[in-house]
Image (spheres, grey):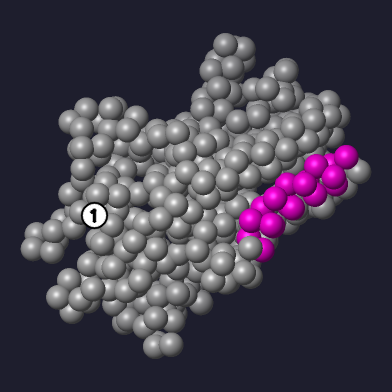
Amino acid sequence: METYAVLQLIGWVTVGFLLFLFAATGGFDLGAGMLSPFIGKTNDERRVVINTVAPTWDGNQVWLVAAGGALFAIWPRVYAASFSGFYFAFLLVLWSLFLRPVSFEYRSKMPSQRWRTFWDWGLCVGSFVPALIIGVGVGNLFLGVPFQYDPVSLRFFYGPEMQDTNAIAALFGLLRPFALLAGVVSVVMMLMHGAAYLTFRTKGVVYQRAKICTQVFSWLVLVTFVLGGVWIATAIQGYHWTAMANPMLHPLTNEVTQSLGGWLTNYTTYPIFLLCPILGIGGALFVSAFTAMKKHFAAFCCSCASVFGIVTTAGVSLFPFVMPSSTHPAQSLLVWNATSSQTSLIGILVTAVIMVPVIFYYTAFVYRKMWGRDVKMSPEAVQEATHTLY
């Protein structure tokens, strides 16, 4: 394999790994944020949930920022196409994420119960919307995005579904049935992950409720993930790439065919990839089993494994497509035609080799110093440190 092709594969793995890191770290604090108004019945109980993630939630979102930066640097065409077509959806994610830091900081500034309840629901909504929209976006990739590329003006143009002058109508155009199911998978996955984290990090009544939620959402992850796989296999026209028609004349003209169940081609070609969905399903099953046995750290680790399996299943199923076109399949964006130059990829690789270990070390240091493995939150602990905690 040529050096450039190897670098392109490394870029694909890098973006996928960063998205997994966000799902695994940001996922549990998004899940905890969604669960906060429901698991916490009193002010102190909600503070327990909030303070389990408060020391590290902002650091967890670094991986989302890093994934966006990697997308821009490694796949500039994908960045241009996706941020143009999903512009309002991305803004909705950003606006909802703005609610999270404000909710953390402001909810305890006033003793009014109405004030605190407002910010508790702000945290819940600010956690729910990104989880849903990201999942819906991934679901739309499997269905194809209605865009085409103009090699003269170097611009992407969109079909009627994405070209509506009403931004709200254009956003709702993305909410197709399968895409909504993908959004539900994303939400329940993060709810399972957040609940597993809370059982590992809390005690008392909050722990008891989190334990029940972990059991419920682990089974919901299993059911919705399997349902999504069946839907892809039996009702969705998948894409299959054969070759670039004329890469010298037009690098975004490919030979692409569509067939029912086409997204499963990689699993028949490379059976080892079946480990990804097996890990997603098996991880969720073991989350339920270890939670029942009160082995909560093991359950949380299995939740991480399930998240890894679900994220990699999406990536492996789409490969080598990054952003398929439903209106002009031959102009779909792939790993092979959407990446930066070889020189740019080498520079990105060198930077990643230096910086990623630094970020890992700093993150591990912060986690260890902030709470450590054996520290558990409870309403009593919140009361004892009421002036130093959120």
- The residue stretch that appears in magenta: 275-292
Please state the horizontal and vertical placement of residue 84, each as a whole percent of the image. 25, 47
Query: Residue furthest toward the left?
Result: 152
In the image, residue 357 above or below residue 93: below
Which residue occupies 41% across, 55% down?
259
Residue position marked by numbered label 1 in the rendering: 328
**What amino acid is found at the position of numbered circle 1 in the picture?**
His
For residue 210, side relative to residue 82 (left or right): right
The C terminus lies in which quarter of the figure? top right
Give the image quarter of residue 127.
Answer: top right
Is residue 277 visible to the viewer in this orientation of the structure? yes
Please state the horizontal and vertical placement of residue 7, each as a whole percent of the image. 42, 79
Residue 205 is one of the magenta-drawn residues: no
Q: Nearer the viewer, residue 259 or 76?
A: 259
Which residue occupies 39% across, 81% down?
5
Please state the horizontal and vertical placement of residue 25, each as a whole percent of the image. 61, 51
Please state the horizontal and vertical placement of residue 77, each as a whole percent of the image. 27, 61
